[in-house]
Image (cartoon, rainbow, N blue to C red):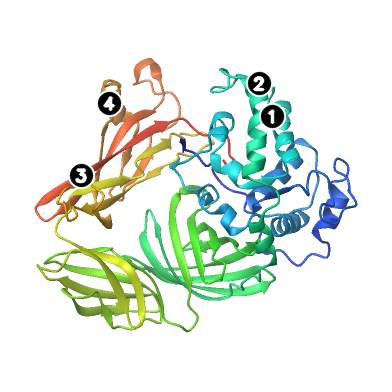
Amino acid sequence: MKRVLRFGGAVAFLGFASAASAIDGPQIIKENCLLCHSETGQAEAPFTRISQQRKTPEGWQMTINRMKSQRGLHISPEHERVLIKYLADNQGLAPSETAGLRYVLEREPNVVEQDVPEHVAGTCTGCHSSARSGLQRRTQDEWEKLVHFHMGQVPSIEFLAGHRDRPWFQIAVDETSVKLGEGYPFKSKAWDDWKAAPKADLKGDWAMSGFMPDKGEFTATMSVMPSQKDEYVVLINGHYADGSKLSGSGSAKVFTGYEWRAAVVIDGRNVRQVFAASEDGKQLSGRAYLKNDDVMGGSVTAVKADKAATLVSVSPASVKQGATQTLVIAGANLSDKVSLGAGVKVEKVLSQSADRLVVQVKAAANAAMGQRDLKVGDQTLAGAVAVYDSVARVEITPSESIARIGGNGGPIPKQKAIYRAVGYAAGADGKAGTEDDLSLGYLPASWTLKAFDEMAEHDNDLKYAGSIDAKGIFTPGDAGLNPERKMSTNNVGNLAVVGTVKDGADAVSGQAHLMVTVQDFVKELIQ
């Protein structure tokens, strides 16, 4: 297991709004790459080194960036865009091959990687996430060449932390490269099947719901209109949870038949969307974040709507016995006939618009506890709303996280950290923290900080490391030396983030660990 605690900063976003090019990918390779690569004369693998790899759009972007910075490649922006599209479409990854690893593409911060392959953990994760290995495919020979590339590019790699106690190069060549070739082979049935499968057209209207840390949850209608093959104009109109409106527009490009990348301006802010389309083209899921502050973002789900009734999500995801609750239902063309089953009465429809339905419901004091299906007209969200008696415990997400000092006149801005509280009711056994606990979804919380341990208390980290606001957004301290601190050290610190949820007269708290550390000087598309 390895924590992935950084994903860099601003992203070179693969290019948008390009006119149709008169030159194709293979011709661009012939005109720009054959000084170092060569043609093989084989239709299935026409170019050495290039034709033996498969990567995501970001992976191919990184390869071209490296060719430009280290190998003297000169290529026009238009040809670069065409080349990335060609390579991602013809030598990409199938949806099943990116599943479970998309967090690194979506730049989700503070991910704790699980089930890292042993051979990767021992040789690769000292510098990279495990997902970086898993998001590429190579021939066995190319995996071995990659090890040799590392030795040539970073000759001191064997002496890095975590490598010194073993013959790193020998293990990497003889064992790791073999395991990588077996686990992530160049040829796969998944890729062959995906290349042969028809690709869905993503034009049309989409019912969307999502979250932005400083704005809260939102619902919207996203209209997608084709501009040219695999490129779209995007219009977004909707509401935030407080009822205020949001609107935006931009452009999107689809790679590999399902990799959605969009640059949109929403209420004056530049936002990036990194989504994956389902294989049938009826769903989009992923993450949206601010262009120059990728921590400031959240998960997004969208369902193809067009003229059909579409149900996407409901918030909040719980109703307390005996209490009245306002539910915001995201979707399109929704009926005002809402049901949550016996014991939960829909008292009134408060508002209805293109992207959402707002209803007031009340749960009877003796309403059966458990997950309820939400029915809106003939649409159903299974297990969407929990009926509960009391909040038994609270978990803070993420449980482990970092933030980075910055600013203060320096070139690297502060990297914030975002927190949310997830509530749980005790299940049938009446005990909190057991397997039958009932998830209540995200709950509103108040936020405080405290020193994580005695050392943090002694160093007064709470005073210097940063602050957290009412929305759960932690902002770290300034970069640079601080003469008020011992030895004029900087404003790093070791803190605990405490989220407290009110439940009637009671208050239930949860805690997460936060390390405030130094700037990240290495910016990569895939960490």
State which mark lies toward you, 3 or 1: 1
Q: Is disc 1 surrounded by few (<14), some (14 to 19) or many (20+) residues within 10 Å?
A: some
Q: Are marks 3 and 2 in contact (CB under 8 Å)?
A: no
Q: CA distance from mark 2 to mark 4?
A: 36 Å
Residue at left offset 30%, top offset 66%: 383
Earlier along the polypeptide chain: callout 4 or callout 3? 4
Q: CA distance from mark 1 to mark 4?
A: 42 Å
| Image marks 2 and 4: residues in contact by CB distance under 8 Å | no
Q: Earlier in the sequence, mark 1 or mark 4?
A: 1
What amino acid is labelled 4 in the image? Asp
414 and 212: which one is in front?
212
The three-letter code of the residue at mark 2 reads: Ser
Q: Which residue is mark 3?
A: 509
Residue receiving disc 4: 453
Mark 1 = which residue? 173
Q: Secondary structure at mark 4?
A: loop
